[in-house]
Amino acid sequence: MPRINLLPWREAERKKRQRDFGVAMAGGVVAAIAVVLLTMFAYSQMISAQEARNARLTSEIKELEKSITEIDGLERQKERLLARMEIIEQLQKSRPEIVHLFDEIARQLPEGVYLTGLKQTGTRVEVRGVAQSSTRVSALMRQIDASEWMADPEVDRVETTQSGASRQAEFVVYLKQESKGEDDMEIGR
């Protein structure tokens, strides 16, 4: 005889399927939450690692900027020192020139001309003096023009004044000091 089960088996099967579905759903939700948490953890680790690299780069950039500033300061100091050395070198080269200028002025000074003042600005020299006549001043100009250490004489003024029983000419003459190279100086000696 066939056996017939009259128990509500469909109802039990439905409850079992609902329970299995609930367990699977809870497992899926737990798995999804775990995946989301692991992803968030991995991204937070990557972000913190990148922030640490950025902080290191920032500190290195600051140190490099300090080094650049220091190098710029050293470059400026080097330029100043080179400029000083160049000025000192020029002064060393021009030191004997003033001796030659005074020697040449003494040689080229005609008789009857007396100097009262000399003033040098760069290569331009102002010569003040007194001469017995204005022709003596023109003789001085010719002598200066013929000199190898002086050139381009210019008369600023010549005034004839009466001094006691004699007349004299007060003058101001400008001239240019010629500088000679070291080879020319040795030949000229």
Image (cartoon, grey):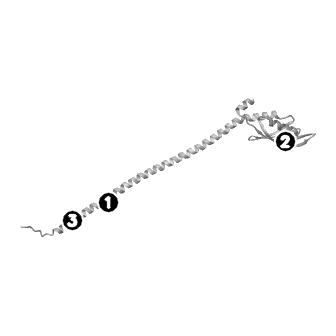
Q: Earlier in the sequence, mark 2 or mark 1?
A: 1
**Real-space Cα distance between discs 3 and 1?**
24 Å
Please state the horizontal and vertical placement of residue 100, each as a whole percent of the image: 76, 33
Residue 20 falls in image quadrant: bottom left
Residue at image position (71%, 36%) is 94
Secondary structure of the residue carrying tag 1 is: helix
**Real-space Cα distance between discs 3 and 2?**
132 Å
Q: Mark 2 = which residue? A: 171
Of tags 2 and 1, the one toward the viewer is: 2
**Real-space Cα distance between discs 2 and 1?**
109 Å
Question: In the rendered structure, which amino acid carries the disc numbered 1?
Answer: Ile
Residue at image position (36%, 54%) is 42
Q: Is residue 163 toward the left or the right of residue 72 in the image?
A: right
Question: In the rendered structure, which amino acid carries the disc numbered 3?
Answer: Arg
Query: Circles 3 and 1: CB distance less than 8 Å?
Result: no
Judge whether 55 appears above or below 149 on screen. Answer: below
For label 1, the crowd category at 10 Å Cα-Cα, with few meaning under 14, some 14 to 19 and many 20 or more, is few
Please state the horizontal and vertical placement of residue 172, each as a whole percent of the image: 82, 42
Q: Is residue 18 toward the left or the right of residue 65 in the image?
A: left
Secondary structure of the residue carrying tag 3 is: helix
For label 2, the crowd category at 10 Å Cα-Cα, with few meaning under 14, some 14 to 19 and many 20 or more, is many
Q: Mark 1 = which residue? A: 33
Residue 101 falls in image quadrant: top right
Q: Earlier in the sequence, mark 3 or mark 1?
A: 3
Q: Earlier in the sequence, mark 3 or mark 2?
A: 3
For label 3, the crowd category at 10 Å Cα-Cα, with few meaning under 14, some 14 to 19 and many 20 or more, is few
Residue at image position (44%, 50%) is 53
Circle number at residue 17: 3
Residue at image position (35%, 56%) is 39
